[in-house]
Image (cartoon, rainbow, N blue to C red):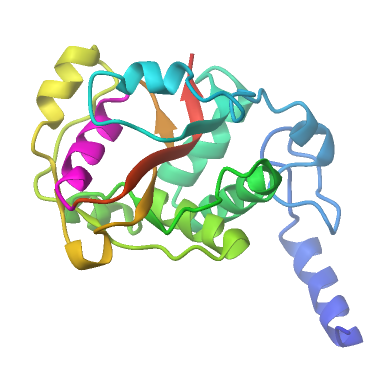
């Protein structure tokens, strides 16, 4: 049982720095995290967790085979729900990334998606970008997932070179720009295991395709992908 003083301190902290829903900006209740229950209910979920082949598979179909591929919600940069990813990444909110990963994992836990997954492998940042940002958002998301599932986070990929912002390029241009970006590391921790690659946002699939290609060189038993956001 929490000490009464902790409740008093929590109350003081909330008064000075109120916990607000990242979507509607209303104060969060004690048992709400990141989003209020109303905004969580209205999250534009992809509803693709139960489909063996879906739009993500389609975007990756001409590359390394993928066992499971899921994103939690449809990302629209004009929507308030874009803040879940944009704020986390560009406003230096690593804790928000962890909470986002945990909420997503908690909701997906009963679907069986995580059954048989041996390790979580975050898509890495080049060291220069990580130094500038201060953290890797996909690593924090993976840590949030791990806190719910108990699956370990493994640094199985390294970004061996940087690349520019890809949002202005089409799928072919992104694939060309990203070729050779990642390299598998710690192969002994990857070989023969079912690896789940964690990203923050799936667009054309070029980043994940390159990550899948690199990880496949370590001879895992299976490769799957998961991200909070998916563009339509």
**In front: 69, or 181?**
69
Query: How far from the left and from the top, in percent, is residue 127?
Result: 18, 56
Q: Is residue 214 above or below residue 16?
A: above
Magenta stretch bounds:
205-218
Q: Residue at x 41, y 42 (%)?
A: 90
Quarter-of-image position of residue 21: top right
Residue 2 among those drawn in magenta: no
Q: Is residue 120 above or below residue 81?
A: below
Q: Residue at x 31, y 23 (%)?
A: 60
Q: Is residue 167 above or below residue 33?
A: above
Task: Using residue 158 as the reference point, say whether residue 109 is left or right of it.
Answer: right
Query: How far from the left and from the top, in percent, is residue 14?
Result: 78, 63
Q: Number of marks in the image? A: 0
**In front: 172, or 23?**
172
Q: Residue at x 17, y 32 (%)?
A: 164
Main SS, magenta residues = helix
Residue 211 among those drawn in magenta: yes
**In front: 140, or 11?**
140
**Can residue 19 be seen in this snapshot?**
yes
Query: How far from the left and from the top, in percent, is residue 191?
Result: 24, 59
**In front: 54, or 134?**
54
Quarter-of-image position of residue 79: top right
Query: How far from the left and from the top, in percent, is residue 176?
Result: 10, 22
Quarter-of-image position of residue 83: top right
**Can residue 186 be seen in this snapshot?**
no
Task: Using residue 207 as the reference point, say whether residue 144 is left or right of it.
Answer: right
Q: Is residue 113 above or below residue 208?
A: below
Rendered-image quadrant of the N terminus: bottom right
């Amino acid at each position: 049982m929490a000490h009464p003083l902790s409740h008093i301190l929590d109350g003081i902290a909330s008064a000075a720095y109120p916990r607000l829903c990242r979507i509607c900006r209303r104060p969060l209740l004690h048992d709400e995290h990141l989003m209020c229950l109303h905004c969580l209910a209205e999250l534009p979920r992809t509803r693709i967790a139960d489909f063996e082949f879906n739009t993500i598979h389609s975007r990756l179909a001409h590359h390394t085979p993928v066992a499971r591929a899921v994103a939690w919600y449809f990302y629209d940069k004009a929507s308030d729900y874009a803040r879940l990813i944009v704020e986390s990444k560009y406003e230096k909110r690593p804790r928000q990334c962890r909470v986002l990963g945990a909420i997503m994992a908690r909701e997906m836990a009963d679907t069986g998606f995580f059954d048989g997954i041996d390790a979580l492998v975050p898509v890495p940042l080049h060291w220069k970008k990580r130094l500038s940002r201060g953290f890797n958002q996909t690593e924090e998301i993976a840590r949030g997932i791990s806190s719910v599932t108990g699956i370990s986070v493994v640094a199985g990929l390294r970004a061996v070179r940087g690349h520019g912002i890809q949002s202005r390029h089409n799928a072919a241009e992104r694939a060309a720009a990203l070729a050779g970006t990642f390299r598998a590391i710690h192969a002994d921790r990857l070989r023969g295991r079912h690896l789940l690659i964690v990203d923050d946002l799936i667009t054309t699939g070029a980043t994940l395709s390159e990550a899948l290609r690199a990880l496949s060189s370590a001879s895992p038993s299976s490769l799957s992908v998961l991200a909070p956001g998916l563009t339509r």
